[in-house]
């Protein structure tokens, strides 16, 4: 990479948008992002690629199911003719888990440039009964560790996860997942019906987190006939299936459609329960951040980054994981419109500091090495 591009990336926030490639032309890719976890590919591939492309730097983002090959018989996901030999690579943990164990040290694949591995979860502390079930492959973790040793460095969303990865990585770079630019945030539809709607949306991996919330939600619904609890996504706990005021929307949405779906639910508040397990403690406070982006008052467990990045009674209500604490917090939010408005306003201010404009320069520096 030339010195001019390095300087441009170093001051990327000030660089005006200018098309670098004619319409219909195939660019020479400045980097390749290969992802197996399509739910998280937005944060490590699509969103940084959009931000960087407006500054003349082009990332090739390839989902694993699209097939990929970097040659040399070492990584064999298929063939893409637009591969740029020698360009730096970023693999996520799922793609690495599916790849063969690297051979002959740093020589594979032979034509690659720098190699980075993104690690989103604590693969060494997977909770019992994790949903969806992980493949029964005893060599999976060994392959992950081998690829981390092979790579030039690892990208992690939190310092805690970096500490877990440290024994296997030459370098650790912390880049938390961030939101799209402010102008891309979806708006919420106006409310036309009476009553309040409290909700949660997510994947099946949060089933254990939601199980513990059930007694508090059911007691709140018994006391407050004006409240509806809304569940969206892939996780429907048993306590939610028979209650007439638990509204269920099953499905799965890729980002940024996921954000538009949450906005469409017309919620008045959002709950973010997580158990204090190592798997959760290593995670960033992403779910509260996404809710705050939509102007939703948040109640969150005082666990890990949730308890550290959120300010109690400013950007969220933080609670201990007991039925009594969750019931008290939800009741308080239902009964106090001023508190809901305050949390919404402060949450929006906080979310505005966590957009791709805050992490884009970090991605630029990483890819420019």
Image (tube, rainbow, N blue to C red):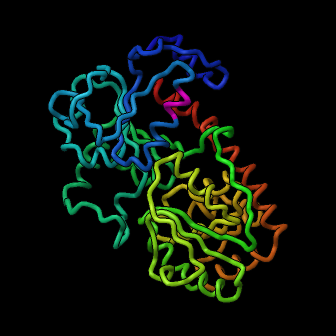
Q: Across the whole image, how many numbered discs are drawn on residues? A: 0
Does the rendering let one see residue 328?
yes
Residue found at x 31% / y 21%: 82
Residue 142 vertical position relative to residue 8 in the rendered view, above or below: below
Residue 23 vertical position relative to residue 289 in the rendered view, above or below: above
Image x and y of residue 255, in percent: 50, 47
Residue 14 vertical position relative to residue 299 in the rendered view, above or below: above
Image x and y of residue 331, in percent: 73, 80
Front residue of 44 and 344 = 344
Image x and y of residue 199, in percent: 61, 68
Front residue of 162 and 363 = 363
Residue found at x 66% / y 68%: 299
- Farthest right residue? 338
| Corner quadrant of residue 128 | bottom left
In which quadrant of the rendered image does the N terminus lie? top left
Residue found at x 21% / y 25%: 110
Secondary structure of the magenta portion, mostly? helix
Image: magenta residue range: 48-52
| Corner quadrant of residue 31 | top left
Does the rendering let one see residue 279?
no
Residue 251 highlighted magenta (yes or no): no
In which quadrant of the rendered image does the C terminus lie? top left
Residue 255 vertical position relative to residue 302 in the rendered view, above or below: above
Q: Is residue 359 left or right of residue 160?
A: right
Image x and y of residue 64, in percent: 30, 41
Residue found at x 52% / y 32%: 363
């Amino acid at each position: 990479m030339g010195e001019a591009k390095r300087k441009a990336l170093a001051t990327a926030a000030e660089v005006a948008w200018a098309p670098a490639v004619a319409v219909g032309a195939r660019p020479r890719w400045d980097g390749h992002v290969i992802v197996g976890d399509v739910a998280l590919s937005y944060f490590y591939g699509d969103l940084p690629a959009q931000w960087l492309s407006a500054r003349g730097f082009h990332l090739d983002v390839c989902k694993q199911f699209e097939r990929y090959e970097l040659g040399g018989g070492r990584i064999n996901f298929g063939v893409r003719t637009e591969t740029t030999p020698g360009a730096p690579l970023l693999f996520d943990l799922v793609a690495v888990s599916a790849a063969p164990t690297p051979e002959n040290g740093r020589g594979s694949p032979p034509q690659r440039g720098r190699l980075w591995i993104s690690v989103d979860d604590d693969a060494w502390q997977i909770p019992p009964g994790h949903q969806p079930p992980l493949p029964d492959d005893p060599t999976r973790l060994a392959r992950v560790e081998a690829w981390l040793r092979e790579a030039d460095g690892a990208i992690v969303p939190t310092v805690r996860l970096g500490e877990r990865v440290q024994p296997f990585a030459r370098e650790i770079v912390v880049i938390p997942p961030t939101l799209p630019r402010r102008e891309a945030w979806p708006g919420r539809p106006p409310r036309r019906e009476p009553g309040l709607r409290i909700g949660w949306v997510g994947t099946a991996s949060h089933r254990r987190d939601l199980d513990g919330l059930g007694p508090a939600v059911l007691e709140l619904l018994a006391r407050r006939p004006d409240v509806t609890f809304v569940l969206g996504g892939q996780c429907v706990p048993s306590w939610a299936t028979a209650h007439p005021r638990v509204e269920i929307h099953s499905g799965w949405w890729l980002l940024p459609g996921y954000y538009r779906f949450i906005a469409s639910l017309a919620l008045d508040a959002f709950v973010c329960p997580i158990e204090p397990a190592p798997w959760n403690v290593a995670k960033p406070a992403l779910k509260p951040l996404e809710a705050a982006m939509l102007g939703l008052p948040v109640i969150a467990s005082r666990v890990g980054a949730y308890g550290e990045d959120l300010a109690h009674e400013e950007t969220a209500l933080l609670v201990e994981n007991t039925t009594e604490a969750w019931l008290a917090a939800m009741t308080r939010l239902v009964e106090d419109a001023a508190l809901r408005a305050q949390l919404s306003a402060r949450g929006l201010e906080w979310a505005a500091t966590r957009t791709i404009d805050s992490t884009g320069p970090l991605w630029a520096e990483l890819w420019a090495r």
